[in-house]
Amino acid sequence: MNSLRPELRIIADWITPGSRVLDLGCGDGTLLAHLVHHHNVSGYGLEIDPANITTCVQKGLNVLQTDLDAGLSDFDEDSFDYVVMTEALQAMRYPDRLLKEMLRVGREGIITFPNFGHWSCRWQLLLGNMPVTPSLPAQWYNTPNIHLCTLTDFEKLCKNEHIHILERTVVDRTHESDVLMRLLPNLMGEIALYRFRKD
């Protein structure tokens, strides 16, 4: 458990042992491997990067190569208890559609994304620059992020799509939280974590 960064430990704590889990954009499989070995989940990962897929296979994980923007049509309704996506929502062409797909194939969704409402982003915008921060390190011209949002934006989308937020927390670039972030999450939180289901 200690090998996981704090953000992923929060996600792992939200997932009931023995569940069925789909990890979207699973990367090198760090989270999924932990859930399989320590939470006894049955899981699949979806990933587009061939190098990450190779790493996942070497870890003994079930992983499929796919583009998340194409949707989750390979999976039936309610195939999973949880559908997880960490720090990929902002890179999706149709994030609203993907959220609905997550809740079509899963009972609950868990998502993380960089918070564009963080004070450092606001300050750089005030100075006339597109923000570059530890959680958003790319320049405007080479960023994979095409749909950045704030906590407020995400929660408005959930309300519009009849998605019920079960839990929310925010962390900083070291994936830790503190009292100030809990008091002013949209201003002080660098990365947002949400657990949600159909309303």
Image: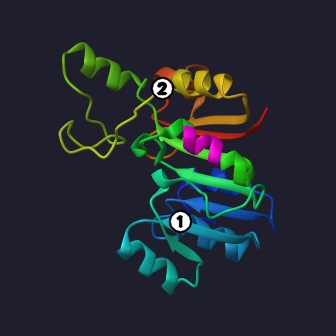
Magenta stretch encompasses residue 98: yes
Along the line of sight, which residue is nearer the eye, 105 or 193? 105
Image quarter of the C terminus: top right
Image quarter of the N terminus: bottom right
Magenta stretch encompasses residue 107: no
Along the line of sight, which residue is nearer the eye, 139 or 158? 158
Secondary structure under tag 2 reads loop
Farthest top residue in view: 126
Magenta residues, as a range? Answer: 97-101
Could you tell me which residue is drawn at 40 percent across and 28 percent down? Answer: 116
The residue at which mark 1 appears reads as: 46
Vertical placement of 36 versus 19: above or below? Answer: below
Give the residue type at disc 2.
Thr
Give the residue type at disc 1.
Leu
**Residue 97 position in % (x across, y down):** 56, 40
Residue 158 tag number: none
**Residue 161 position in % (x across, y down):** 66, 28
Q: Quadrant of residue 130?
A: top left
The residue at which mark 2 appears reads as: 150
